[in-house]
């Protein structure tokens, strides 16, 4: 007789199915599965792919992650600041990771805007144009990001903030920075980090509102 039936509407596409069960030391091997039937109509994919992230990984290469496999031969990637269009886009061993190669080198300390045209999945759904901003991210050394101003007693209607200044020649990911205080034993509190992935160029500043 049929032991049970389930419909899982969240899964719209898959290439395999499986079962997971957990047992205790008392049940041992007291499980078996037989006559399992998986049915369903093929789901029609009408959702365009999403560009999740992009990251410069070498002097001339940009790595991008998509929400699903794409037709990389249709994708066009353009970069500002005189870099121009990519000369080659190819997949990696992971189905949602791709690399775009350019003919000119990226420079440290600069912020670049990339435009992605015709991001198309295997079913033909397309995102026409997506823009992302990134650069060669570097970790700041001690003293390269300084406290520029602290508003510790804001006027009525104002807000307290801490302003930091990038005095280095590096492009810094602001979300990698953390503002904190010391405990009485000189150890650091947890503090907080910026939620947004902002980029801080050389000689730029940003304020953390508290």
Image (cartoon, rainbow, N blue to C red):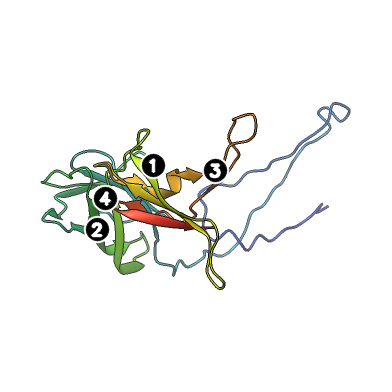
How far apart are the two marked residues, 3 and 1, measured between alpha carbons?
38 Å
Q: Eyeballing the image, is 190 above or below 40?
A: above
The residue tagged with tag 4: helix, strand or loop? Answer: loop
How far apart are the two marked residues, 1 and 4, measured between alpha carbons?
38 Å
**Dot in front, 1 or 2:** 2
Q: Left or right: where does residue 151 sit relative to residue 122?
A: right
The circle on residue 94 is 1
Front residue of 103 and 169: 169
The circle on residue 147 is none
The crowding category of the residue bearing disc 1, from other C-alpha atoms within 10 Å (few below 14, some 14 to 19, many at least 20), is: few
Q: Mark 3 or mark 1: name the one nearer the start of the chain.
A: 1
Front residue of 177 and 93: 177
Q: Mark 1 or mark 4: name the one nearer the start of the chain.
A: 1
Q: Which residue is mark 3?
A: 180
The circle on residue 203 is 4
Q: Mark 1 or mark 2: name the one nearer the start of the chain.
A: 1
Residue 98 visible within the image: no
Front residue of 186 and 38: 186
Q: Which residue is mark 2?
A: 114
**Dot in front, 3 or 1:** 3
Could you tell me which residue is drawn at 34 percent across and 45 percent down? 172
The crowding category of the residue bearing disc 4, from other C-alpha atoms within 10 Å (few below 14, some 14 to 19, many at least 20), is: few
Q: Quadrant of residue 210?
A: bottom right
Q: Mark 2 or mark 4: name the one nearer the start of the chain.
A: 2
**Dot in front, 2 or 4:** 4
- Where residue 40 appears, x then y in whole percent? 60, 62
The crowding category of the residue bearing disc 3, from other C-alpha atoms within 10 Å (few below 14, some 14 to 19, many at least 20), is: few
Q: Mark 2 or mark 3: name the one nearer the start of the chain.
A: 2
- Where residue 119 appears, x then y in whole percent? 30, 62
Q: Mark 3 or mark 4: name the one nearer the start of the chain.
A: 3
């Amino acid at each position: 007789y049929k032991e049970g039936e389930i419909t899982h509407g969240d899964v719209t596409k898959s290439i395999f199915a499986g079962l997971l069960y957990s047992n205790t030391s008392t049940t041992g091997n007291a499980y078996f599965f037989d006559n399992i039937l998986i049915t369903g109509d093929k789901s029609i994919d009408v959702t365009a792919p999403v560009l999740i992230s992009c990251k410069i990984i070498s002097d001339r290469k940009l790595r991008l992650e998509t929400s699903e496999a794409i037709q990389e031969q249709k994708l066009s990637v353009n970069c500002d600041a005189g870099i121009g269009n990519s000369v080659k886009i190819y997949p990696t061993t992971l189905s949602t990771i791709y690399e775009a190669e350019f003919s000119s080198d990226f420079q440290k300390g600069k912020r670049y805007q990339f435009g992605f045209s015709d991001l198309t999945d295997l079913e033909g759904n397309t995102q026409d144009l997506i823009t992302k901003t990134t650069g060669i991210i570097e970790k700041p050394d001690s003293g390269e990001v300084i406290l520029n101003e602290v508003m510790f007693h804001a006027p009525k209607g104002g807000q307290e903030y801490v302003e930091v200044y990038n005095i280095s020649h590096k492009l810094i990911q602001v979300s990698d920075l953390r503002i904190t205080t010391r405990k009485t034993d000189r150890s650091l509190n947890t503090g907080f980090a910026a939620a947004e992935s902002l980029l801080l160029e050389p000689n730029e500043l940003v304020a953390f509102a508290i």
